[in-house]
Image (spheres, helix red, strand yellow):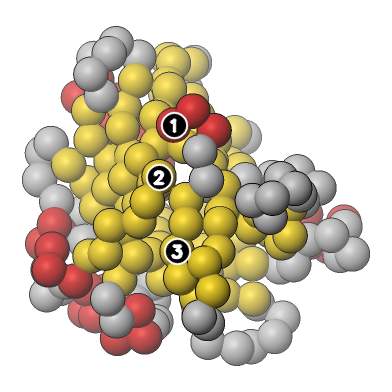
């Protein structure tokens, strides 16, 4: 069962997503984002699927940012898969890969940077139209990384499931102050509601 769920999740995640409706309804709280989750065949197999993730602020017109890697594989328990996030040693090298798959053709394992506390547990269950998935960092941990000379902390999580002939991806990513637990940026008022616009082939 887990192999079917893993393959289904891989196809659910592969694509381009936007939260245009949410941003229009609540512009004070939600930026209009475009999110790409581009398959990386060179780091994938029948047992592990790898994605390069990046996003862009649609209104600003600025280049895509926040390039990172997500790998998913079977879990050790029934009803569970595993996820692992990585940074890239040279993220700017892959800027634009969401819309230009040629940029990830030669991505190698050597370019992945392991991030502390970046392993995720992905629960799933069968629903009428496929599966519903919920991903969260293990034990509520915070992933950490260095940016602009400072250590930053982030919570990473998502849900994805079929909805009204498409797929709804809810992302909970937000920066956290480790001393107070207060959210600093990201999904401060609830998850970003990302609707799948295009599916990418494996």
Quadrant where the C terminus lies? bottom left
Q: Are marks 2 and 1 in contact (CB under 8 Å)?
A: yes
Secondary structure beneath dot 3 equals strand
- The quadrant where residue 97 appears: bottom left
Query: Separation of disc 2 and disc 1 at Cα?
Result: 8 Å
Q: CA distance from mark 3 to mark 1?
A: 17 Å
Q: Which image quarter is the N terminus in? A: top left
Per the rendering, the mark at residue 145 is: 3
Q: Which of marks 1 and 2 precedes in the sequence?
A: 2
- Disc with the residue nearer the chain's start (2 vs 3): 2
Q: Position of residue 53 (x, y in %)?
A: 40, 63
- Residue that lies at the very extreme toward the front in this rendered image: 179
- Point out which mark residue 117 bears: 2
Left or right position of 103 against 33: left
Q: Is residue 156 above or below residue 43?
A: above
Residue at the top extreme, as displayed: 78
Give the quarter of the image for residue 38. bottom left
In the picture shown, does residue 151 fall above or below 171?
below
Does 20 appear above or below 190? Answer: below
Tell me where residue 110 appears, x and y as whole percent.
Answer: 12, 68
Which residue is the site of mark 1? Answer: 138
């Amino acid at each position: 069962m887990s192999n079917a769920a893993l393959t289904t999740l891989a196809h659910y995640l592969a694509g381009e997503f936007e939260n245009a409706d949410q941003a229009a309804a609540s512009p004070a709280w939600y930026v209009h984002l475009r999110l790409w989750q581009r398959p990386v065949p060179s780091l994938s197999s029948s047992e592990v699927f790898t994605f390069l993730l990046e996003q862009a602020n649609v209104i600003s017109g600025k280049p895509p940012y926040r390039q990172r890697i997500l790998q998913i594989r079977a879990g050790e328990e029934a009803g569970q898969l595993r996820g692992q996030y990585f940074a890239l040693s040279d993220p700017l090298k892959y800027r634009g890969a969401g819309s230009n798959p040629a940029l990830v053709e030669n991505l190698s394992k050597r370019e992945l940077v392991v991030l502390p506390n970046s392993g995720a547990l992905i629960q799933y269950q069968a629903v009428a139209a496929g599966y519903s998935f919920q991903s969260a960092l293990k034990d509520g941990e915070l992933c950490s990384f260095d940016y602009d000379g400072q250590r930053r902390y982030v919570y990473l999580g998502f849900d994805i499931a079929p909805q009204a002939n498409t797929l709804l991806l809810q992302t909970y990513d937000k920066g956290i102050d480790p001393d107070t637990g207060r959210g600093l940026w990201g999904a401060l008022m609830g998850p970003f509601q990302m609707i799948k616009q295009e599916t990418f082939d494996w």
